Amino acid sequence: MGLLGGSFDPAHAGHVHITKAALERFGLDRVWWLVSPGNPLKSRGPAPIEDRMGRAAKLMQHPKVQITDIETRLGTRYTAQTLAALQMRYDGVRFVWLMGADNLAQFHQWQDWQEIMARVPVGVLARPGDRLAARMSKTARMYRESRLIGRAAFTLGQATAPAWSFVNLPMNQMSSTAIRKAGRWTSDAVVADASGA
Ligand SMILES: Nc1ncnc2c1ncn2[C@@H]1O[C@H](COP(=O)(O)OP(=O)(O)OP(=O)(O)O)[C@@H](O)[C@H]1O
Ligand SMILES: O=C(O)c1ccc[n+]([C@@H]2O[C@H](COP(=O)([O-])O)[C@@H](O)[C@H]2O)c1
């Protein structure tokens, strides 16, 4: 089970793109989008969760992908806490944390980041501008020996933590920041933009 945590403020085509890639490239059965109550490292609060959930559900329609506000229901905001709660609640389910390369670059600033590495395999997807910073990151260097390279990435879903993989893929430029800057959040335009219509 892949977990793509995010603010999704709003969801866009980049999220859809990396989710489909993660299903294929990491040998996952399903992916959950964890629509976050709010990124602990971002000072600006996101749009109301109902709005973000609604947009995400309109955009991401795939039989293997589910959109969830489970972090709000669990009362967790930090990823390490969320993973601990999910592993306790879903005993026997193998979780894989998914993220774009921008997040790998600053992963060592996350709360209990080494505990996250110890709990679950991590799948990283290339993002424009962030490939080099991600590869040079503290996490990439410290966990060099735990990296699954090339075809081994397909086994990430079955791997024992610590394990991580970085996959290159045709990159998608979309970002929520760009959508917010263009003032296109509040209309149906965001779904049209995001789906490439
Ligand atoms: N275009 C993209 N390519 C690769 N990864 C992406 C892309 N857009 C988002 N992601 C990843 O999806 C996850 C959730 O992203 P998030 O909801 O923060 O969207 P965002 O576009 O990065 O938002 P913002 O611009 O507000 O920071 C993060 O791990 C992020 O790295
Ligand atoms: O746990 C942390 O310290 C932490 C710090 C930064 C981000 N995260 C998580 O990373 C995911 C991506 O965040 P964002 O805002 O870039 O979409 C989301 O699930 C956040 O809760 C988690």
Image (cartoon, grey):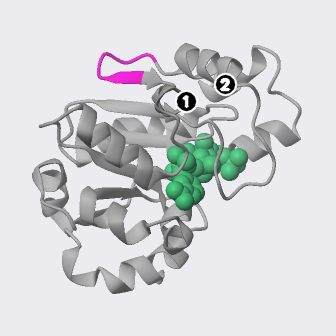
Which residue is located at x 52 percent, y 35 percent?
75
Residue 139's spot in the image, x, y percent? 41, 77
Amino acid marked by disc 2 = Ile
Residue 114 vs residue 11: left or right? left
Q: Of 13 and 96, which appears nearest the observer?
A: 96
Which residue is located at x 48 percent, y 80 percent?
137
Q: Is residue 62 magenta?
A: yes
- Give the extent of the magenta segment: 61-66
| Image quadrant containing the C terminus | top right
Q: Is residue 132 magenta?
A: no
Let me know if residue 148 appears in the view: yes
Q: Classify mark 2: residues with Cα within 10 Å, few (<14), some (14-19) or many (20+).
A: some
Look at the numbered disc 1 and give the secondary structure of its residue. helix
Q: Which residue is mark 2?
A: 49
Q: Of 31 and 120, which appears nearest the observer?
A: 120
Which residue is located at x 51 percent, y 64 percent?
111
In the rendered image, which quarter is residue 121 located in? bottom left
| Image quadrant containing the N terminus | top left
Residue 74 vs residue 53: left or right? left
Q: CA distance from mark 2 to mark 1?
A: 9 Å
Residue 11 vs residue 100: left or right? right
Q: Which mark is residue 72?
A: 1
Let me know if residue 172 appears in the view: no
Residue 103 vertical placement versus 177 (above, below): below
Q: Classify mark 1: residues with Cα within 10 Å, few (<14), some (14-19) or many (20+).
A: some
* Cβ–Cβ under 8 Å for marks 2 and 1: yes
Q: Of 46 and 148, which appears nearest the observer?
A: 46
Label 2 beta carbon within 8 A of ligand 2: no
Residue 23's spot in the image, x, y percent? 28, 38
Amino acid marked by disc 1 = Thr
